[in-house]
């Protein structure tokens, strides 16, 4: 697979002495949707800023295609589109002027048809002659996305693109990301909504305190990490779990109508059969069964917590 | 060369001026008209001619310079300070645009505005006072060079400034006094000998003097020194800007 972005041992220490990135290495193949997850202050924005040329790393190098972001900055920046985390817009411009400005800034000749297409895709066409100051927060965020796409970039960074965007539009944004990928673009996004990463990413990276803790295929990650829970609904409510069942580490549901068994579905023995027969030995009659797979959110939190210990 | 980018910045800055048409063009025109009425017509009629020039006419070049210099500074400084202040600078920093192209866009727009303001004031002046311009070509050259050089200086101030106070500090404490003491309203030959010597250290004197020479053919300092001092000033500003971008000072972390 063609590598579009390659980050090699990149470190960044801010002037105040804070080390925001610590030897980050990462390869992103062309056409991938990559989600970068991490708590506040993890270094996500700093990493993106280094790639885009807003921050200069003090160690390591970054390449887009075969171009180095420091030595061949003109080529790399033409390839990149950035949606910043903050709502930074010139309030007194119209939406259309803002888009035209961005396209020109990135060295592209005017293309009215393409800009119209973007505005339509982001449901902004009606607002094209409106001053940005008169738009809502979610609309402003979409203007930022539109601006980032105005020069037809191949590598798109979305730094929390859906913060403050309502649910319906968030879905549309995800569709847009998929559409961009179908058009050949590669997308890297950061988000605090884990369902967002779960929904659209191919691979997920987890960063904390400037260290890239893990990069993994989304499905593999969820399989590897996933604990499953078997929820056993019982016929007659129980008050306490009999001592003889201690070995299974069961949790009693607060209603008393179910017990919860946690197991690893990849283990050679899940212990489900033994647990169920132990239940019947204790005269607990099973009414229904339900399994629950832990979400990425749970996976993510378990990783961050492990890191803190 | 990323021409589209330069053009985009230039257009954006000009559009900003058009949105604030009153502040950009009308305000300097009104304030200089008041100067003309007060100093040129009212008080000026009581002041004897200077070097054979009617006082009202004498102050025309000085007043144009006063406006051109202050407008160049504030326009260019504001132009680059604003994106830093509201965060939109991220786009400039992440765009395939060189420092030189950025400067041409911002400084070009600021200088264009100043030149227009200078010309508008010149036309306004003809409504109050009658005068002739001896060296029209040189007048335009001085107008152009002064606009460019002070726009460059304003650009530096805009990059250096981290808050609104700093943005206004240098124009207020340094440039305005230099402009007023640089012979805008008088010829330095009217000053005592000591002050004449001190005035020679004021760079603005050379600009005003050169500009006035292009109108009336008389000057406080030799004309070649005026031209040279502008070029030295431009070179100095370009060098500082080069250092700023080289080190990423206050723009790139
Ligand atoms: N200009 C700066 N100067 C000094 N420190 C900075 C600067 N920018 C960021 N930092 C610090 O670097 C660390 C990483 O910041 P960064 O913005 O990259 O985090 P993030 O992962 O994007 O967080 P969030 O999810 O809150 O956006 C933080 O501790 C932050 O305080
Ligand atoms: Mg961030």
Image: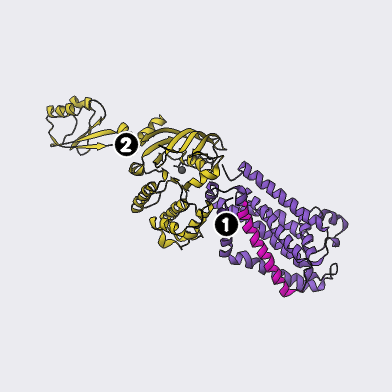
Chain colours: A yellow, B purple
Mark 2 = which residue? A219
Q: Secondary structure at mark 2?
A: helix
Residue A39 position within the rendered picture, expressed as x and y whole percent measured from the top left: 42, 39
Part of the protein shown in magenta: B103-131
Q: Is residue A231 left or right of residue A199?
A: left
Q: Secondary structure at mark 1?
A: helix
Which quadrant, please, contains the N terminus of chain A?
A: top left
The answer to whether B93 is drawn above or below residue A225 in the figure is: below
Which chain does the residue under circle 1 lie in? B
Which chain does the residue under circle 2 lie in? A
Q: Which secondary structure dominates the residues rendered in magenta? A: helix
Q: Tell me what residue is drawn at x 86 percent, y 61 percent.
A: B189
Residue B222 position within the rendered picture, expressed as x and y whole percent measured from the top left: 83, 57
Q: Is residue B165 left or right of residue B53?
A: left
Which quadrant, please, contains the C terminus of chain A?
A: top left
Mark 1 residue crowding within 10 angstroms, few (<14) / some (14–19) / many (20+): many
Mark 2 residue crowding within 10 angstroms, few (<14) / some (14–19) / many (20+): some
In this rendering, does residue B237 appear at all? yes
The answer to whether B177 is drawn above or below residue B57 in the figure is: above
Q: Is residue B112 magenta?
A: yes
Q: Tell me what residue is drawn at x 36 percent, y 40 percent.
A: A202
Res B107 → quadrant: bottom right
Mark 1 = which residue? B7
């Amino acid at each position: 697979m063609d590598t579009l972005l390659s980050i090699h041992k990149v470190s960044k220490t801010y002037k105040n002495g804070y080390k925001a990135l610590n030897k980050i290495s990462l390869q992103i193949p062309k056409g991938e949707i990559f989600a970068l997850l991490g708590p506040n202050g993890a270094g996500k924005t700093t990493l993106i800023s280094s790639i885009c040329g807003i921050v200069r790393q003090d160690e390591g190098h970054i390449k887009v295609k075969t171009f180095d972001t420091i030595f061949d900055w003109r080529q790399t920046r033409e390839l990149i589109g950035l949606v910043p985390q903050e709502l930074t817009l010139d309030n007194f411009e119209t939406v259309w002027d803002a888009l035209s400005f961005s396209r020109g800034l990135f060295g592209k000749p005017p293309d009215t048809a393409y800009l119209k297409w973007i505005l339509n895709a982001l449901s902004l066409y009606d607002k094209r002659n409106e001053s940005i100051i008169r738009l809502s927060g979610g609309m402003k965020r979409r203007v930022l996305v539109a601006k980032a796409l105005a020069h037809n970039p191949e590598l798109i960074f979305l730094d929390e693109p859906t913060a403050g965007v309502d649910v319906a539009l968030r879905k549309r944004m995800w569709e847009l990301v998929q559409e961009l990928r179908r058009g050949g673009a590669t997308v890297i996004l950061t988000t605090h909504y884990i369902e967002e990463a779960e929904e659209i990413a191919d691979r997920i990276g987890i960063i904390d305190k400037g260290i890239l803790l893990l990069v993994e295929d989304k499905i593999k990650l969820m399989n590897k990490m996933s604990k499953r829970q078997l929820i056993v609904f019982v016929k007659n409510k129980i008050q306490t779990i009999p001592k003889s069942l201690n070995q299974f580490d069961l949790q009693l549901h607060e209603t008393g109508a179910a017990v919860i068994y946690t197991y690893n579905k990849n283990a050679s023995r899940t212990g489900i059969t033994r647990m169920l027969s132990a239940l019947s030995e204790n005269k607990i009659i099973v009414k229904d069964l339900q399994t629950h797979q832990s979400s990425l959110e749970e996976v993510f939190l378990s990783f961050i917590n492990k890191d803190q210990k | 060369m990323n021409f589209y980018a330069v053009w985009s910045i230039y257009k954006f800055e000009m559009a900003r001026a058009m949105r604030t048409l009153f502040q950009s063009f009308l305000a300097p025109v009104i304030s200089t008209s008041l100067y003309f009425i007060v100093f040129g017509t009212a008080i000026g009629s009581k002041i004897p001619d200077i070097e054979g020039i009617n006082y009202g006419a004498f102050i025309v070049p000085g007043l144009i310079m006063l406006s051109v210099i202050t407008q160049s500074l504030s326009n260019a400084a504001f132009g680059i300070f604003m994106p830093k202040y509201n965060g939109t600078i991220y786009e400039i920093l992440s765009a395939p645009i060189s420092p030189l192209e950025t400067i041409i866009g911002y400084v070009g727009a600021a200088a264009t505005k100043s030149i227009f303001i200078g010309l508008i004031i010149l036309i306004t002046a003809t409504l109050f006072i009658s005068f002739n311009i001896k060296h029209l070509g040189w007048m335009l050259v001085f107008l152009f060079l002064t606009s460019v050089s002070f726009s460059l200086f304003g650009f530096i101030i805009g990059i250096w400034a981290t808050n609104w106070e700093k943005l206004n500090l240098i124009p207020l404490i340094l440039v305005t006094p230099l402009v007023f003491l640089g012979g805008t309203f008088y010829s330095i030959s009217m000053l005592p000998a000591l002050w004449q010597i001190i005035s020679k250290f004021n760079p603005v004197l050379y600009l005003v003097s050169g500009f006035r020479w292009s109108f009336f053919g008389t000057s406080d300092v030799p004309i070649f020194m005026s031209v040279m001092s502008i070029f030295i000033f431009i070179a100095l500003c370009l060098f500082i800007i080069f250092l700023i971008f080289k080190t990423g000072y206050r723009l790139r972390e």
